[in-house]
Image (tube, helix red, strand yellow):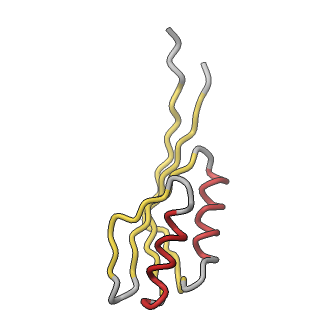
Amino acid sequence: MMNNEWHVSGLMVQARPEKLPALINALLAIPETEIPVTDRQQGKLVVLMQADRSQALLEKIESARNLEGVLAVSLVYHQQDEQGEVMP
């Protein structure tokens, strides 16, 4: 039996409103990233990211922080699950 990790995080991203269109495209280019809510006037985004390892998730979050126009990234939620592979 092999264990597989799964991580998901919810982030609040504050950005410059004028940079939002390009920022949304850049965030969505990060694999396993979704943006379910945006407030274009305030420059706020709710961003969901998933990864199979904690280090991979941290790297995705850090890459979001480094995108042009990002003012702040706040971790709001994180969940880790380990799923065992089912053997027939």
- Measuring from the top left, give residue 10's x and y in whole percent: 43, 62
The residue lying at 35 percent from left, 88 percent from top is 42
Q: Is residue 52 left or right of residue 81?
A: right
Q: Residue furthest top?
A: 88
**Which picture quadrant has residue 67?**
bottom right
Figure quadrant of residue 48: bottom left
Tell me residue 19's x, y (percent).
49, 86
Q: Residue at x 55, y 86 (%)?
A: 69
Residue lying at 49% horizontally and 68% vertically, measured from the top left = 75
On-image quarter of the N terminus: top right
Q: Is residue 77 above or below residue 32?
A: below
Q: Position of residue 43 (x, y in %)?
A: 40, 85
Image mark count:
0
Judge left or right: residue 32 versus residue 62.
left
Q: Position of residue 36 (x, y in %)?
A: 34, 64
Vertical comparison of 19 with 56: above or below: below
Q: Residue at x 49, y 41 (%)?
A: 81
**Front position in the image: 21 or 78:** 21
